Image (cartoon, rainbow, N blue to C red):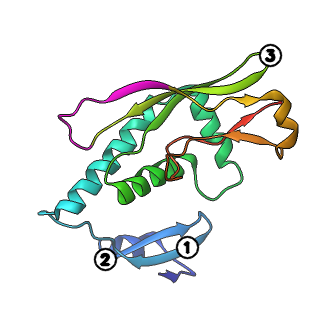
Amino acid sequence: MAKVDKITGETIERLRGKVDFYLLRGITPVARRWPKKPKPPYTALQAEAMAVFKIAQSSKKRISNKMLEAWRKNATGKREAWYDTFTKIIMGYWYKNRSIAPIALDYSIKENEIEFWMELSILQLFIDQTTQEEIYEMETLKIVKKDVEKYPKPIYFTLYDEETTRLVAPYILWQV
């Protein structure tokens, strides 16, 4: 990658297919060698990674508006957009476990006079297209309201598996 001082439309057209000109972080004009997509036949691992990426992209449409708003709040002030974090979690989980991470579609924070907890709607997708997807309900551990004073503030909910690998859910702020 190289910084570019002056560039004309004519130069861009002349070098199309050889040099890629773009704005780095939307500010600095740079040039790099034109990216090459791997040509088929792909390795089995490349094909599986592309299938997982495709599933990650298509699953974004299924998230509820409430969950989408939580994802967007998480991305405020960060370099990564929410959809980049979403995809990164799915791809990282696949890389580690060779399966697709459960995806939180919707949530609600419940409480009674003693405790509060979060209920989630979870989507489980599979790389093998013949295996049917699953949607199930899940709830977090219940937190006793009296114990809340002991916890550092603010309090966020999200999902992790037993090995403390983050699943596909944003950090959701609990308003005391």
Nearer-N-terminus badge (3/1): 1
Residue at disc 3, secondary structure: loop
The magenta-colored residue range is: 127-137
The residue nearer to you, when weighing 129 against 163, is 163
The residue nearer to you, when weighing 35 against 54, is 54
Q: Tell me: residue 21, above or below residue 163.
A: below
Q: Tell me: residue 68, above or below residue 21.
A: above
Residue at disc 2, secondary structure: loop
Residue 15 quadrant: bottom left
The residue nearer to you, when weighing 110 against 88, is 110
Nearer-N-terminus badge (2/1): 2
Residue at disc 1, secondary structure: strand
Residue at the disc numbered 2:
18
x and y, in percent, of residue 5 in the image = 57, 81
Marks 2 and 1, how far apart at CA: 17 Å
Residue at the disc numbered 3:
113
Residue at the disc numbered 1:
29
Asked if residue 93 is among those painted magenta in the image, a careful observer would answer: no
141 horizontally vs 99: left or right: right
> Which residue is rendered at x = 67% and y = 56% of the image?
78
- How crowded pointer 1 is (Cα within 10 Å; few <14, some 14-19, many 20+) is rated as some
Quadrant for the C terminus, please: top right
> Which residue is rendered at x = 24% and y = 54% of the image?
48
